[in-house]
Image (cartoon, grey):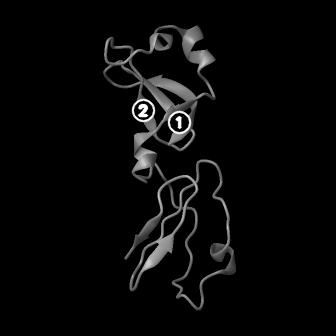
Amino acid sequence: MERLITGFHEDEAGDLVAELACGHDQHVRHAPPFQLRPWVLTEAGRTARMAVPIDCPLCERFEPPANLTLTRTSPEWTEATMPAGLRKRHRLAVGGWGRITVLQGRLSLSSTNGPHLDGS
């Protein structure tokens, strides 16, 4: 899944890391012939890549960012008591993540940003 670059920083080893809108970080290196990213070598090149999408493999695997903070929870619900808003198309805020824990039974979830999930 592609996510927008929102900033850059260096890690403890001095390697350049792109900060993504989803909350993940991703190393961006120019290491020919395997990774061709000459734009990471200059400040102007990095500035030109701000708000440009880059593939986020962690989002592909639906892995939440490590620095998430819990903002709210919902009570447990069943098929009969499920909130109406969850039964129709809706979105999370940019950079927001949702987590559903299935305690019993099965859940089918469709996402326009990723694969169809069907499991318990």
Query: Upstream in the sequence, badge 2 or badge 1?
Result: 1
On the image, the x and y values in percent for residue 86 come to: 63, 74
Which residue lies at the image location 64% right of the left edge and 81% below the top edge? 83
On the image, the x and y values in percent for residue 55 come to: 47, 35
Which residue lies at the image location 60% right of the left edge and 84% below the top edge? 82
User: Is 76 above or below relative to 22?
Assistant: below
Locate residue 57 relative to residue 33 in the image: left or right.
Answer: right
User: Is 74 above or below relative to 6?
Assistant: below
On the image, the x and y values in percent for residue 59 come to: 45, 47
- Most extreme residue toward the bottom is 80
* Camera sees residue 13: yes
Q: Secondary structure at mark 2?
A: strand
User: Is 64 above or below relative to 40?
Assistant: below
Mark 2 vs mark 1, CA separation in Å: 8 Å
Residues under numbered marks 2 and 1 in contact, where contact means CB atoms less than 8 Å apart: yes
Front residue (pair 63, 73)? 63
For label 2, the residue is 26
* Label 1: how many Cα within 10 Å (few below 14, some 14–19, many 20+): many
Which residue lies at the image location 63% right of the left edge and 29% below the top edge? 51
* Label 2: how many Cα within 10 Å (few below 14, some 14–19, many 20+): some
For label 1, the residue is 20
